[in-house]
Image: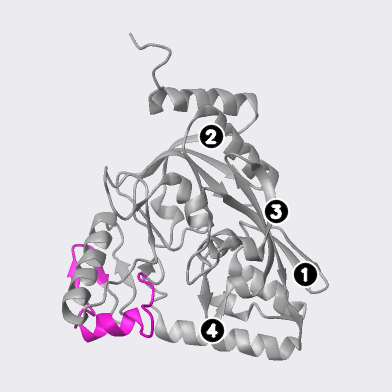
Amino acid sequence: MSSWTEPLRLADRLSVLDQLAREHGINLEPDVPLGPLTTLRVGGRADRMASARTVDELVAALETARAAGVPAGVLGKGSDIVVADAGVRGLVIRNRADGIEIDGRLVRVASGAAMATLVRRCTAAGLAGIEFGISIPGSMGGAVWANAGAHGGEMKDVLDSIDVWGPAAGASTLPNAACAFGYRDSRFKTSGEIVLGTVIELAAGDEGEIAARVAANQAQRKATQPLADQNAGSVFRNPPGDHAGRLIDATGLKGFRIGSAQVSTLHANFIVVERGGSAADVRAVGDHVRAAVADEHGVELQYEIEFVGDWGPGERWATPTSRLAGA
């Protein structure tokens, strides 16, 4: 018989989570497939899933998971991630908190808002500076978490403040300068904090000119990226002074395939996967590309996509469930 001093097994903690969720009116779904909720469309199931339509519901789900001792992560639009075939242990919260409020040049954005929707709203309001966001397929939370960027712009360029929730401090607001933004990086990748919402500051501009820049960005993305294929976005970060896609192409890896996954023939820094494919194949292609580029060019590419879920003990690239924040 287990002693009360021993830690509870995950199954026991999930039972506690179920009870607390019922008490707080939070609807939990068991054993939910995650692949269909990601742009790559591969991967296994979540032990439990909750949906949050407001920031308050998001915080309530996070605090309930904390009280039950269950690992929890937040899933936005499902880009930039590869869910393990074995799935995700604990609670995944599907972030549907997508409010956008415009007040002059300041825009308050909930973390579940789609970047494309935000760009369209700001364009219609004659606000400039976020046009690059039309090429970011995810949500605001994920874009902040990764300091996402395109067409010469990054999230750090427009962010004024960020509302976050942390497992120790609860809810708080951080200024831009406190977020340690770097190239596709921020404090949120290691702090365990969840992005709840942001305030961005833009510039007044001509709606027609802004719309033209947005359209040009869309056209460039359509012409250069495999949007018709299942993919998770750019696989590797660009190394200093170079481009990952150029290095992969120069290594002769366009079209390289393992099982259901292959390097895109349109853009070498994308891995595309067949319907019904596996996360393991995606990972195998990515690891082969890293090794081949290192051998050929002496450059060790760093993953930009995140491998989330149960990839096995000691997995170097696996991202803990708590790092699922906002993708």
Q: Please state the horizontal and vertical placement of residue 224, each as a whole percent of the image.
A: 41, 84
Residue 266 seen in the figure = no
Of the 4 image quadrants, the one containing the N terminus is: top left
Looking at numbered disc 4 in the image, what kind of residue is underneath it? Gly
Which residue: 50% across, 36% down? 29
Mark 4 falls on what kind of element? loop
Residue underneath mark 3: 173
Residue underneath mark 4: 152
Which residue: 38% across, 11% down? 3
Q: Please state the horizontal and vertical placement of residue 113, each as a whole percent of the image.
A: 63, 61
- Tag 4–tag 2 contact (CB < 8 Å): no
Residue 28 got which mark?
2
Give the CA distance from mark 3 to mark 1.
16 Å
Looking at numbered disc 3 in the image, what kind of residue is underneath it? Thr
Left or right? Give the position of 292 relative to 310.
left
Tell which circle, 4 or 2, labels the residue nearer the N-terminal end.
2
Residue underneath mark 1: 106
